[in-house]
Image (spheres, grey):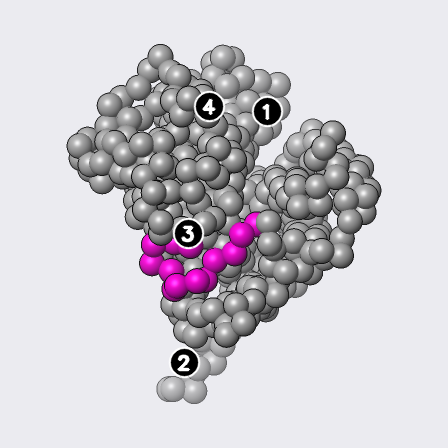
C-alpha cells in the first residue's frame, strides 16, 4: 500500500482513471455523430416517417452520451490547476490557446446545433436541420482537433522556447506549436478510431434488434450503414496507423523501443504476443516476425532502430535517462498495451469483413445468430483498442510529461515527477479519488439505464409530428412556387 503515500503516483492514477472514464463517451459521441448525420441525410432525401424515426432515435442516444462526455471532461481540465499545478505553469502559455479555441470554436458550435436537433425539427427548414446534424458532427471533430493539438504538443513540443528561469515554455510561433510533428498523424489516427467505435456501436444495436426480431427494417438499414462506415474507416486505419508509427519512431525513440521491449539496437521484430522480462531485458514470446516492426515503420525489414540502452548511452536525454534509470521504466506495461491494441485491430478487421460480406449478400446477417452475437460484442474491440492506444501513448513517454522529442527546441521538456502540485497531499488525493469513483459509478449506471431504455423502446414513428413536418415542407414548396410565379408575372 505504499502508493497511498506517493502524491505523484496518486495524482497520476486519478488523472488516468478520469481520462479513461471520459474516453468511454468521447468515442461514442464522435462516432455516433456521423451515424446521426447519415440517417438525417437519408430522411431528408426520402421524407419517410421510418427514416425520421431512425434519425430521432440516434439523436437521443447521441445526446445522452454527449451530455455525460461534457461533464466528465470538465474535471480533467480542473485537475491541471489542482493536482498538476507545476505542469500548468510550465505549459500555460502554450495550452491557453488550444483549450480556449476548443471551447469557443468547437464546443459552442456543437452545442448550438445540437439544440437545433433537439428542439428545432418543426421550427426550421429541412435543409437547415440537415446542415445542423452535420455541423454537430463537425463540431465534435473540431473539438477533438484542439485537444489533440494540446496533447501532441506534450508528445512533440514545437513553436516554443524555455524561459530564462527555466520554469515555463513560452510560445514563439502558434502555428508551429499547433501543427507540431505529430498533430496530423495522431489526429487522423484518433478520429478514425472513434468513427470505428461509432460504427461498431450502431452495428451492435442493429444486431440486437435482428436477434430479437424487433424493428427489423430499421436494423437492416443500420447494419448496411454501419458496415460501410466500418469498412471505410478500418481500411483508412491501416494508413493512419502506419503514419503514427513512423512519427513515433522518428520523434520518440524511447517510446518506440518500449513498445517492442527493445533494450538493444536491432531490426525490430513484430511480436504477436509476449512478455518483457525487465530484469533480463528480454522479450519472452513464442511468435515473432523478424524485422516486422521495422517494416511497419520504414518499409524495410532490415532497418535498425536503437534500443533503450543505446538511447541511454547516447547522452541525448542527460541524467534523466541513463542505464541505471531504465529499470524504472514501465516497459512491459507499454509492450502489453501496444500489442493489445494491435490484437484488437485484428478482431476489428475480421468483424468488419464478416459484417460487410454477410450484410450485402442477400442480407444473410438477419438469420446468422453467431454473427449477430459477434456484432453485439464487437464494440468491445475498438473500445479496448482505443484505451490501449492511449495507455501506450501516455505511459510510453515516461519519465516525461512533456517529452524531449527529436525535433523539439532545446530544453523544452518536463519530468512527470516535477510537474505535480506540492500543496496537494496524499490523503486529499486518496479521498478525492474514492469520491470520483463513487460519483462516476452512479453516473455511468444512470447513463446505461437511459441508453438501454432508448434501445428497448427503439425508433418510434411520430405520426402527428411527421404529418406536421410534411405539411410544413409542402407549405414551403407552395410558398416558393408562389414567389416564382409572382417574379414571372413581374418579368412579363
Percent across and percent down for residue 233 are 38, 39
Q: Does dot 4 land on a helix, a strand or a loop?
A: loop
Front in this rendered view, residue 52 or 192 = 192
Q: Position of residue 73 (x, y in %)?
A: 65, 52
- Report x, y in % for residue 153: 46, 58
Look at discs 2 and 3 and give the one toward the viewer.
Answer: 3
Q: Earlier in the sequence, mark 1 or mark 4?
A: 1
Which residue matches tag 1? 209
Residue 348 visible, this orientation: no
Which residue is the site of mark 4? 279
Q: Earlier in the sequence, mark 4 or mark 2?
A: 4
- The residue pinned by badge 2 equals 488
**Is residue 115 rendered to the left or right of residue 101?**
right
Whole-number angstrom distance, CA of label 4 to CA of label 2:
87 Å
- Residue 341: quadrant of the picture: top left
Q: Nearer the viewer, mark 1 or mark 4?
A: 4
| 432 falls in the magenta region | no
Amino acid at each position: 500500500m505504499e502508493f497511498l503515500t506517493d502524491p505523484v503516483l496518486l495524482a497520476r492514477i486519478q488523472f488516468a482513471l478520469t481520462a479513461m472514464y471520459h474516453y468511454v463517451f468521447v468515442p461514442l459521441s464522435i462516432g455516433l455523430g456521423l451515424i446521426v448525420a447519415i440517417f438525417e441525410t437519408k430522411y431528408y432525401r426520402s421524407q419517410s416517417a421510418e427514416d425520421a424515426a431512425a434519425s430521432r432515435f440516434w439523436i437521443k442516444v447521441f445526446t445522452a452520451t454527449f451530455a455525460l462526455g461534457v461533464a466528465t471532461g470538465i474535471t480533467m481540465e480542473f485537475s491541471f490547476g489542482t493536482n498538476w499545478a507545476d505542469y500548468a505553469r510550465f505549459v500555460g502559455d502554450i495550452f491557453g490557446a488550444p483549450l480556449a479555441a476548443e471551447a469557443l470554436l468547437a464546443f459552442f458550435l456543437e452545442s448550438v446545433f445540437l439544440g437545433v436537433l433537439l428542439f428545432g425539427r418543426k421550427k426550421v427548414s429541412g435543409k437547415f436541420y440537415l446542415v445542423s446534424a452535420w455541423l454537430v458532427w463537425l463540431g465534435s471533430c473540431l473539438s477533438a482537433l484542439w485537444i489533440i493539438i494540446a496533447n501532441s504538443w506534450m508528445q512533440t513540443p514545437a513553436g516554443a522556447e524555455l524561459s530564462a528561469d527555466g520554469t515555463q515554455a513560452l510560445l514563439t510561433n502558434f502555428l508551429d506549436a499547433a501543427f507540431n510533428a505529430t498533430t496530423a498523424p495522431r489526429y487522423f489516427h484518433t478520429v478514425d478510431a472513434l468513427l470505428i467505435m461509432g460504427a461498431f456501436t450502431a452495428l451492435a444495436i442493429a444486431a440486437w434488434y435482428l436477434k430479437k426480431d424487433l424493428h427489423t427494417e430499421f436494423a437492416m438499414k443500420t447494419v448496411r450503414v454501419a458496415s460501410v462506415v466500418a469498412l471505410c474507416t478500418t481500411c483508412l486505419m491501416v494508413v493512419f496507423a502506419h503514419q503514427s508509427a513512423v512519427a513515433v519512431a522518428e520523434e520518440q525513440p524511447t517510446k518506440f523501443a518500449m513498445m517492442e521491449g527493445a533494450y538493444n539496437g536491432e531490426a525490430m521484430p513484430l511480436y504477436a504476443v509476449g512478455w518483457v522480462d525487465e530484469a533480463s531485458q528480454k522479450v519472452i514470446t513464442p511468435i515473432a516476425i523478424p524485422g516486422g516492426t521495422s517494416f511497419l515503420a520504414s518499409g524495410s525489414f532490415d532497418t535498425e532502430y536503437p534500443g533503450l540502452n543505446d538511447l541511454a548511452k547516447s547522452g541525448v536525454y542527460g541524467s534523466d535517462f541513463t542505464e541505471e534509470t531504465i529499470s524504472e521504466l514501465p516497459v512491459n506495461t507499454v509492450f502489453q498495451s501496444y500489442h493489445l491494441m494491435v490484437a484488437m485491430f485484428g478482431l476489428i478487421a475480421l468483424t468488419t469483413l464478416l459484417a460487410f460480406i454477410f450484410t450485402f449478400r442477400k442480407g444473410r446477417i438477419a438469420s446468422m445468430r453467431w454473427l449477430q452475437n459477434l456484432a453485439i460484442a464487437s464494440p468491445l474491440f475498438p473500445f479496448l483498442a482505443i484505451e490501449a492506444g492511449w495507455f501506450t501513448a501516455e505511459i510510453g513517454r515516461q519519465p516525461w510529461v512533456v517529452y524531449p522529442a527529436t525535433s523539439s527546441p532545446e530544453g523544452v521538456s518536463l519530468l512527470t515527477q516535477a510537474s505535480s502540485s506540492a500543496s496537494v497531499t496524499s490523503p486529499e488525493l486518496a479521498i478525492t479519488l474514492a469520491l470520483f469513483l463513487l460519483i462516476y459509478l452512479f453516473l455511468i449506471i444512470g447513463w446505461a439505464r437511459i441508453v438501454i431504455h432508448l434501445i428497448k423502446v427503439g425508433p418510434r414513428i411520430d405520426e402527428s409530428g411527421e404529418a406536421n413536418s410534411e405539411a410544413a415542407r409542402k407549405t414551403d414548396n407552395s410558398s416558393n412556387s408562389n414567389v416564382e410565379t409572382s417574379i414571372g408575372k413581374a418579368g412579363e
